[in-house]
Every structure is written in C-alpha cells, then in structure tokens.
Image (cartoon, rainbow, N blue to C red):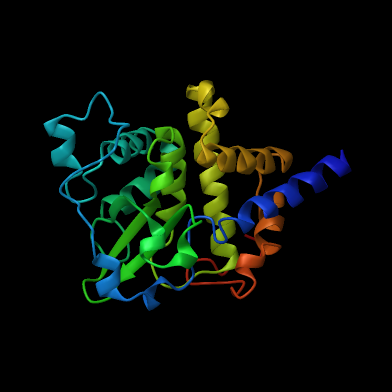
Amino acid sequence: MKREKIFLLIASVMLLQSSICFARDNAPTGIDETKLNKGITTEKSQSVNKPEFDTDAYAREYRKVTKDGAVMQAMEMMKGLNIAKYSYNALMGNNLTEKPVHIEFRNLAEIDQKYASFEALGWKNEKKNRLYIYINEKHRNAPPEAIAALLSHEALHQDTLSSLNEETYAWTMEASVWMKLAEKNPSVLNSPSSLVTRENMLKKLFEKGDYTNKYIKRAVFSNPGYKLLPTRSPGFEDEDL
C-alpha cells in the first residue's frame, strides 16, 4: 500500500512536469498585451463538441463569458453541481473584478512558447480589470466534464498572486468536481483525452487521501513548477489548508 501511494505521488509530479502549473501560471501579467490579443477571434466558435442545447438562449446567457459551445456545456454542468457553484458564479462575474471571466480555447504557444504545454492559462488585464482563461486548444474535444473540472479550478484564481495553499485548494476543488461529474457519467473515465488523464490522476490522489487534500497537497508542494510560490496568498492564509 505504501509503495502504491509513493507511485501515485511520483506519477502526479511527472504528469505535472509537462504542464508545469497545471492550469495556472504565476505571472501572466508579464505578457505583452499586443501579442496576447493578436489573432484572437471570439466571434466564431470552432468547437466540434457543441452541446445539443447550444441554442440562442444559451448563447445569450453566456455571451459575456464565451462563444464556444463546449465551454457553455461545461458551464451548464457546473451550474447544476453544488460543489461547483462558487466557481460557476465567479466565472459569471461574482469575483474580485466584478466582471464575467472571458473563456476561450487558444494555442498557448502563440502567447509564449513556454506556455505551450500548459493545460490552461489564467491572465488578468489590469487596464480593463478583467480576468481571462485560455484553455489549451488540444483540449477542445475533451469531455465537457473534464473542461468543467478544469474551469472549477481556474475560477479560484482571481488575482495575480498565487501560493501553494491556493493551488492545493484549487486542485482539490478540481478533483472533487471531476469525481462528482464522473459519478453521473462513468464513461468519461475511459476517455483517451489527455485532460482526462490529468483528472483521473487527481481523482486517485483525492481518493487515496480518503477524500481530503492530504496527497494532493504533497503533490503540489513537491511540484518543481511551484518552487518559487509562497505558502500563502490572500484568502489562503491557513497553514493547515
């Protein structure tokens, strides 16, 4: 049993090394804003994973958040899940900026090559006081359950500050949402999506910790991508988080 737990921790760190901060970069504010916005086309959704309910009504509901049907579908799943309600409300505008978060799929390498392997990138436009989430375009066809879990994590990052405590909380939220959605649709656990591979790893760590953050916290604190992060950040000061 001990050997299996050690293997899970090692495997999780190896998985993270290919996507350093998972769904968060610690200092996206250093990105050239002109370069960041170059080539963005939000008027047309290229998603091939559009939900059956992608009607004009849903387009109107989420028009300030996204133009992509796959993201809308993920948002609807979050909306119907109690544990994801805080993240859902944050994405809809109940966050530190008091504005909806803009979400779209992007080739993150076009922003900066160092972000190419990231699962997603959170960024704040200080001038507009608005938050953005760019999901790696390789996940465009991922199950909406996995996208919902990822967004539940990203929605917790609402400023340019991060910490080990904050990442631990976000990873645990992501694992919890993924577990609940997978209970409703177990077939997603077998998806070949690389995003599902990540979610399943978090789920295993969550289960090994008896549904606490015990092993997730160990994985976060041992992640080389987080070695420069402080232990605490605003809202996540509790050492025992």
The picture quadrant where one finds residue 157 is bottom left
Residue at horizontal 50%, vertical 69%?
Answer: 162
The picture quadrant where one finds residue 176 is top right
Of residues 137 and 211, the one drawn nearer to the viewer in this rendering:
137
Where in the figure is residue 86, as x and y percent of width and height? Answer: 39, 48
Residue at horizontal 12%, vertical 32%?
Answer: 56
Of residues 230 and 29, the one drawn nearer to the viewer in this rendering:
29
Where in the figure is residue 11, as x and y percent of width and height? Answer: 72, 47
Q: Is residue 62 found left or right of 203 in the rendered image? A: left
Q: Is residue 148 above or below residue 185?
A: below
How many marks overall? 0
Where in the figure is residue 18, as x and y percent of width and height? Answer: 59, 55
Residue at horizontal 17%, vertical 40%?
Answer: 61
Q: Is residue 33 found left or right of 191 in the rendered image? A: left
Could you tell me which quadrant the C terminus lies in?
bottom right
Q: Is residue 160 found left or right of 167 in the rendered image? A: left
Q: Is residue 40 above or below residue 97?
A: above
Where in the figure is residue 208, as x and y percent of width and height? Answer: 73, 40
Of residues 168 and 132, the one drawn nearer to the viewer in this rendering:
132
